[in-house]
Amino acid sequence: MKKTDLYKNLALKIDREMKQATTPDRFGQGEVLDRKAQRKLDQAKGLVPFAVKLDAQLTESLRTLAASRQIGLNELVGELLEKGLAAA
């Protein structure tokens, strides 16, 4: 067997091991839920998916405001909608 064939086999072995490896714990902080489980948790909380299309500047200002207040974007939008509906 040639030396290049040995290196090729070694590379294939390393590639196979990388594909079969799981994600290290440092990347998966806690339990990762699949979509079905996450949807059931959201339904239990009474959350409903609601998709809208917004202007890019508006979404950027929402993200900035959420980051400055250190809350999630969903929480911020919900809060702003409640305030707007209460004022109407």
Image (cartoon, rainbow, N blue to C red):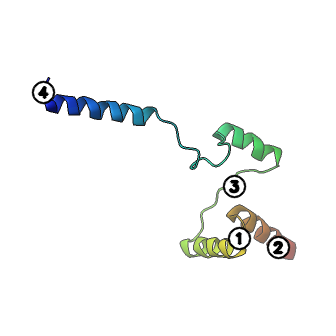
Residue on which the image places disc 4: 2
Q: What residue is shown at x 82% (from left), y 48% (from top)?
A: 45
- Residue located at (40% from left, 32% from top): 17
Instruction: Name the N-terminal-most of marks 2 and 4.
Output: 4
Q: Nearer the viewer, mark 4 or mark 3?
A: 4
Amino acid type indicated by mark 3: Phe
Asked if marks 2 and 4 touch (Cβ < 8 Å), the reply is: no
Q: Secondary structure at mark 3?
A: loop
Q: Amino acid at mark 4?
A: Lys
User: Does label 3 or label 2 sit earlier along the sequence?
Assistant: 3
Q: Which residue is mark 2?
A: 83
Q: CA distance from mark 1 to mark 4?
A: 59 Å
x and y percent of residue 53 in the render? Answer: 60, 63
State how far apart marks 1 and 3 are (Cα).
22 Å
Tell me which label, 1 or 4, sits earlier in the chain.
4
- Mark 4 and mark 3 lie on one chain; the one further toward the N terminus is 4
At label 1, which amino acid type do we have? Gln
Please tell me whether mark 2 or mark 4 is closer to you in this view.
4
Q: What's under tag 2, amino acid-wise?
A: Lys
* Label 1, residues with CA under 10 Å away: few <14, some 14-19, many ≥20: few
The residue lying toward the viewer, choosing from 21 and 37, is: 21
Q: Is residue 14 left or right of residue 63?
A: left
The residue identified by callout 1 is 70
Q: Which residue is mark 3?
A: 50
